[in-house]
Image (cartoon, rainbow, N blue to C red):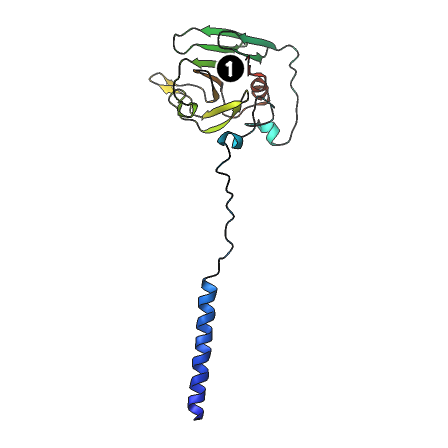
Amino acid sequence: MNKKYIIILIIILVLLGLGGWYLYSQKQPMNPSVVSDDNDQSAIDNLPADPSADPSAGEAGEADKAGQQSEINTDDWLTYRNEEYGFEVKYPSNMRIDNYNHDIRPSIIFMNKDKKNNWYFEIDIYKNFKRDLSSYALLDFEATGYTKLAGQKANIYEVPTGYCDGHGCGYPFIAYATKKDEDIISLIFFSDVDLNEQENYILSTFHFLN
């Protein structure tokens, strides 16, 4: 065979080999992502920890996040118990309670007796909410997250701008809302959107009577 044809044949075979290797390499997966098939698991099982079960769980305060454990003295705290709506919660003894008996949306406001301290919280009851908790908008704000409160699914609302109307804007707040029977029960903490240790403890003491 002519030497020239042998060289051409070798070149053709080399090119065919390189082409085959290239096609094979393109078909191989590169670091495929692992996808967990947990669709059959209940959504509530995937929620964050219940802040009412442990003050350091769920939406923990900055001190807890930083790993700095500190304790607050709750020896003189009082218990607020509401038989009508079936819940109770502990609160600092330096706070007074004001009740607003609105037909649709009554509220219980826990105000600091020291007027120089603008921190306060309230518990709102929205009566006869027929729809699912996930569709509930607090003061026209949609939920920004989800957790558990008193062992039940709860919405979280973080509103750094506060509620605004024609008179201006209120304090920033963070709120937790859950549903008991047909009523929405909301705990709203004003002045910030990050829970401090005292607020975490208040959440930990909130529970339903039955």
Q: Residues within 10 Å of mark 1 (few under 14, many from 20)?
A: some
Q: Where is residue 119 in the image (x, y as percent from the top left)?
A: 52, 16
- Quarter of the image holding residue 102? top left
Report the residue at 64% width, 14% height from top. 74
Residue 183's place in the image compared with 66, above or below, is above
Residue 95 seen by the camera: no
Residue 86 lies left or right of residue 130; in this view the side is right
Report the residue at 37% width, 22% height from top. 140
Residue 103's place in the image compared with 205, above or below, is above
Q: Position of residue 157 (x, y in %)?
A: 45, 25
Residue 86's place in the image compared with 141, above or below, is above
Screen quadrant of the C terminus: top right
Residue 140 seen by the camera: yes
- The three-letter amino acid code for the residue at tag 1 is Tyr
On the image, numbered disc 1 is attached to which residue?
A: 120
Q: Where is residue 131 in the image (x, y as percent from the top left)?
A: 39, 21
Residue 55 lies left or right of residue 5; in this view the side is right
Disc 1, SS: strand
| The residue positioned farthest toward the left in the image shown | 166
Which residue occupies the foreground of this view, 86 or 54?
86
- Number of numbered markers: 1
Q: Position of residue 4 (x, y in %)?
A: 42, 90
